[in-house]
Image (spheres, rainbow, N blue to C red):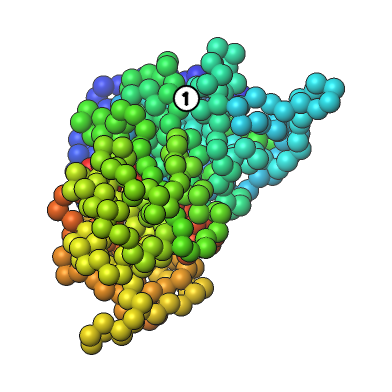
C-alpha cells in the first residue's frame, strides 16, 4: 500500500531554505513553524505538480491529483533526527468506497471469520499521512479505517516485523474526529522510538522500530488516482494541513523524553465516587497500581514511586501516615492533585499551604466563605505561561464542574486561567513545594472532561513533569 520514497535535494536549495527558516525563531516552547500559512516555502513541491499542492485559507490543500510523473508527496526541505512534530489535519471528504478495509486486532493482525477468511469491511475512505525520516515505510497514517489514524501501516503489515513491534504500531484507541473536522497530531521521534498522540489521546504510546533511519525529511503523503472514466481507483488524499511546527530535540532533551524505565506512578482514590472513564487518562502508563490513602501511606514510599496521583477525598490521616507522605515529598517524590483531591487533609496546613498550594474550603474560614461547586459548566480556558505541563495546549473549552472561593497560596505558579463567573480564575498551578514537583488541577469531574483532548494532554504532561520525565 505504501512504497518507499527517497528524494534528493540540491545542496544549494537546502542551504537557501535553511537560511530562510533561520529567521523564524523558536517560540516560547521551542517550536519552529514548518508552514507559514501563506505559501509552500520550506517544502519541495513535486516537479510537474501544476498547482495541486497549494495553500488555501491558511492551510496546505491537496486534491490528490498531482500531475508529477514521479514522486507526488510534499517533502520538507530539511532533514530531522529527534523531534516533536505538531500539526492539524483534516480529510475534506471520503468519496471512495474501500471494500477491503480490514478488521484489525490489538496485536496488529487481521480478524478472520469462522472459515478462516479475513474480515473485510466496505467503508467510505480517504488516505494520507506523514512520512518520517525520509522514508514512506515509516508513515503515520491518516485515513477512515476503524483502527484509527496514527498507525504505521507498512511496519505493521511487513512480514519481517516482529510480533511485539506489530502490536506496538497498532493504535490503542480510535481517536479520529468525523471527516471534515480538524484533528491534531503530536508525533515524537526519539532514537528508534515513535510516539503518536491524536486529539490529546495517546494512540501509539511508544513503538521501538529497529530499522528506523537516524535522520531524514518529513513528507505529507499523496495517495489515490483516477481511471479513464474519472473515477477514484483508491482512497484519495483529499486533505488539508495547518499549524505545522517542530521542536528539534538535543541529545539531552531527547534523553529526558525517553528516560530509562517506565514512569512509576501510584494512583490514590477513595472517598469520592467517580466515573470509570477516569482511568483512560493513564492508558500510556505501563502499570498503574491503585490504592487508598489509608493503605498506601502506611509504609515508607521513598524511592518506590516517581509520582503519586491523587484523586481521592481523604479528610485526615494520623501522624504516622502523614509522616510517610511528608518523607516522600521531602525526598523529591512528584505529586499530581486532581479535582476533588483538593478537599484532602483539611486540618493539615503543611499539605495545603506548603505542598499543594490550594484547598477547597469545606467551611467558612475567618473572613473567607466556604468554597462552592457548580456542575455542567462550559469554561473557556487559557494557558497562563509557557511550561512543560502546557506543552501542546492552546486555549480550549471544556464542560466540567467548577469550584469557587478556594484557598490559594500566594506562592503558587498559575498554569491555566478562566473568566467563568462560577469558577476561581486559576484552574491549574504548580505548587509552592521546594523539594518536589507538585501540580494541582482543579478540572476533572466526569466523563466529558476525561474525554476532552486538551484535558487529557494536560494530565499526561503533569504526570510526566511531576515524575521528572520532562523538563
Q: Quadrant of residue 262?
A: top left
Q: Secondary structure at mark 1?
A: strand
Above or below residue 200? Residue 398 is below
- Residue sitting nearer the eye, 437 or 292: 292
As drawn, is 10 to the left or to the right of 403? Answer: left
- Which of the image's four quarters has the N terminus? top right
As drawn, is 31 to the left or to the right of 142? Answer: left
The residue sitting at the top extreme is: 160
Q: Which residue corresponds to the image point at 31% horizontal and 31% vertical from the top-left? A: 258
Q: Which residue corresponds to the image point at 45% horizontal and 46% vertical from the top-left? A: 290
Q: Quadrant of residue 331?
A: top left
- Residue sitting nearer the eye, 242 or 398: 398
The residue sitting at the bottom extreme is: 367
Q: Is residue 386 visible?
A: yes
As drawn, is 340 to the left or to the right of 407? Answer: right
Residue 251 image point, x, y percent? 22, 28
Above or below residue 75? Residue 293 is below
Q: Quadrant of residue 439?
A: bottom left
Residue 27 image point, x, y percent? 23, 49
Q: Is residue 219 visible?
A: no
Q: Which residue is mark 1?
A: 138
Amino acid at each position: 500500500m505504501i512504497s518507499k520514497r527517497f528524494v534528493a535535494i540540491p545542496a544549494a536549495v537546502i542551504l537557501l531554505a535553511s537560511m530562510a527558516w533561520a529567521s523564524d525563531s523558536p517560540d516560547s516552547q521551542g517550536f519552529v513553524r514548518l508552514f507559514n500559512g501563506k505559501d509552500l516555502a520550506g517544502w519541495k513541491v513535486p516537479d510537474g505538480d501544476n498547482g495541486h499542492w497549494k495553500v488555501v485559507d491558511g492551510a496546505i490543500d491537496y486534491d490528490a491529483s498531482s500531475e508529477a510523473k514521479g514522486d507526488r508527496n510534499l517533502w520538507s526541505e530539511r532533514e530531522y533526527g529527534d523531534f516533536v512534530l505538531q500539526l492539524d489535519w483534516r480529510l475534506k471528504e471520503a468519496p471512495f468506497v474501500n471494500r477491503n478495509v480490514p478488521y484489525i486486532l490489538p496485536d496488529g493482525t487481521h480478524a478472520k471469520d469462522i472459515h478462516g477468511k479475513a474480515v473485510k469491511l466496505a467503508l467510505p475512505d480517504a488516505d494520507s499521512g506523514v512520512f518520517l525520516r525520509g522514508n514512506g515505510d515509516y508513515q503515520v497514517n491518516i485515513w477512515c479505517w476503524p483502527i484509527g489514524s496514527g498507525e504505521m501501516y507498512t511496519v505493521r503489515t511487513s512480514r519481517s516485523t516482529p510480533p511485539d513491534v506489530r502490536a506496538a504500531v497498532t493504535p490503542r484507541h480510535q481517536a479520529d474526529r468525523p471527516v471534515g473536522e480538524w484533528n491534531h497530531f503530536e508525533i515524537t521521534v526519539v532514537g528508534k522510538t515513535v510516539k503518536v498522540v491524536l486529539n490529546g489521546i495517546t494512540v501509539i504510546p511508544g513503538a521501538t522500530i529497529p530499522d528506523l533511519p537516524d535522520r531524514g525529511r518529513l513528507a505529507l503523503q499523496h495517495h489515490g488516482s483516477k481511471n479513464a472514466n474519472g473515477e477514484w481507483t483508491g482512497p484519495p488524499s483529499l486533505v488539508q494541513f495547518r499549524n505545522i511546527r517542530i521542536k528539534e530535540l538535543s541529545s539531552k532533551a531527547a534523553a529526558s523524553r525517553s528516560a530509562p524505565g517506565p514512569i512509576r506512578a501510584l494512583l490514590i482514590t477513595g472517598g469520592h465516587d467517580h466515573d470509570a472513564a477516569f482511568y483512560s487518562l493513564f492508558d500510556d502508563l505501563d502499570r498503574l497500581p491503585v490504592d487508598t490513602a489509608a493503605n498506601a501511606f502506611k509504609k515508607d514510599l521513598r524511592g518506590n514511586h516517581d509520582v503519586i496521583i491523587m484523586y481521592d477525598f481523604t479528610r485526615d490521616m494520623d501522624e504516622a501516615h502523614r509522616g510517610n507522605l511528608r518523607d516522600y515529598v521531602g525526598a523529591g517524590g512528584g505529586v499530581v492533585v486532581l479535582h476533588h483531591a483538593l478537599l484532602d487533609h483539611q486540618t493539615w496546613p503543611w499539605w495545603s499551604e506548603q505542598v499543594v498550594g490550594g484547598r477547597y474550603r469545606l467551611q467558612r474560614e475567618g473572613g473567607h466563605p466556604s468554597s462552592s461547586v457548580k456542575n455542567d459548566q462550559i469554561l473557556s480556558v487559557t494557558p497562563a505561561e509557557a511550561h512543560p505541563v502546557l506543552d501542546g495546549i492552546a486555549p480550549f473549552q471544556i464542560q466540567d464542574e467548577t469550584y469557587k472561593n478556594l484557598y490559594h497560596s500566594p506562592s503558587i505558579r498559575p498554569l491555566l486561567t478562566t473568566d467563568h463567573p462560577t469558577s476561581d480564575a486559576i484552574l491549574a498551578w504548580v505548587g509552592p513545594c521546594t523539594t518536589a514537583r507538585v501540580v494541582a488541577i482543579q478540572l476533572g469531574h466526569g466523563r466529558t472532561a476525561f474525554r476532552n483532548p486538551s484535558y487529557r494532554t494536560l494530565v499526561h504532561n503533569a504526570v510526566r513533569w511531576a515524575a521528572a520525565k520532562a523538563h
